[in-house]
Image (cartoon, rainbow, N blue to C red):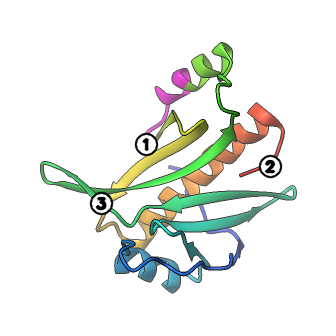
């Protein structure tokens, strides 16, 4: 099993949250207790900017909202690898490769949402700090690796 250590983080300017934006004390506590800087987006998502080797960086978001399915109560952790212009399509070769990659992941999968290529997974809403941070690291490294390969850029 591969373990991911938290990497150096950069604090982003935290915008004021709308009063009705959801928050989750469990996420805030896990990030704060592990000295991980984050900002909260207007929709409540926690945004973390990782500084990576090779002068790269990667953004990861943790949703404060949870979803239930039976006895499962989970939250989404996600990161983007590429953005596309309105009407632009992901090349067939890349789409097929990402779908094939999905079959090999223990957790997480690629999807296309809002004209962005996104890697995401869910984690139990009551996950331990370690599980949440390992999930964040997994999402971050997976998305950044594909971003570098797919675009050669460092947009996310």
Q: How many marks?
A: 3
Mark-to-mark CA distance, 1 and 2: 24 Å
Q: Height in image: 90 above or below 52?
A: above
Q: Residue at x 42, y 73 (%)?
A: 129
Q: Earlier in the sequence, mark 1 or mark 3?
A: 3
The segment highlighted magenta reads 99-107
State the residue at coordinates (38%, 51%). 122
Q: Which residue is mark 3?
A: 66
Disc number at residue 154?
Answer: 2
Observer-nearest of 24 and 30: 24
Residue at x 67% of width, y 66% of height: 49
**Label 1 or label 2, whichever comes before in sequence order:** 1
* Direction from residue 42 to residue 90 in the image, left or right: right
Measure how far apart labels 2 and 3 are at the Cα level: 30 Å
Q: Residue at x 59, y 78 (%)?
A: 15
User: What is the secondary structure assignment of the residue under circle 1?
Assistant: loop
User: In which quarter of the view is residue 51 placed?
Assistant: bottom right
Can you tell which mark lies on residue 43?
A: none
Residue 11: image location, x then y, percent: 69, 78
The residue wearing badge 1 is 107
């Amino acid at each position: 099993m591969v373990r991911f250590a938290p990497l150096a983080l950069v604090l982003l300017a935290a915008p004021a949250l709308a009063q009705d934006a959801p928050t989750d004390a469990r996420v805030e506590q896990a990030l704060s207790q592990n000295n991980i800087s984050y900002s909260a987006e207007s929709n409540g998502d926690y945004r973390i900017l990782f500084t990576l080797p090779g002068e790269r960086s990667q953004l990861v978001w943790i949703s404060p909202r949870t979803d239930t399915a039976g006895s499962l109560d989970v939250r989404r952790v996600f990161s983007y690898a590429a953005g596309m212009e309105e009407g632009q399509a992901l090349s067939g070769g890349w789409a097929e490769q990402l779908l094939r990659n999905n079959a090999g992941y223990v957790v997480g999968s690629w999807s296309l949402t809002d004209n962005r290529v996104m890697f995401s997974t869910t984690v139990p809403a009551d996950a331990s700090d370690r599980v949440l941070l390992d999930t964040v690291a997994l999402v971050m490294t997976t998305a950044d690796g594909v971003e570098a390969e797919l675009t050669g850029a460092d947009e996310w």
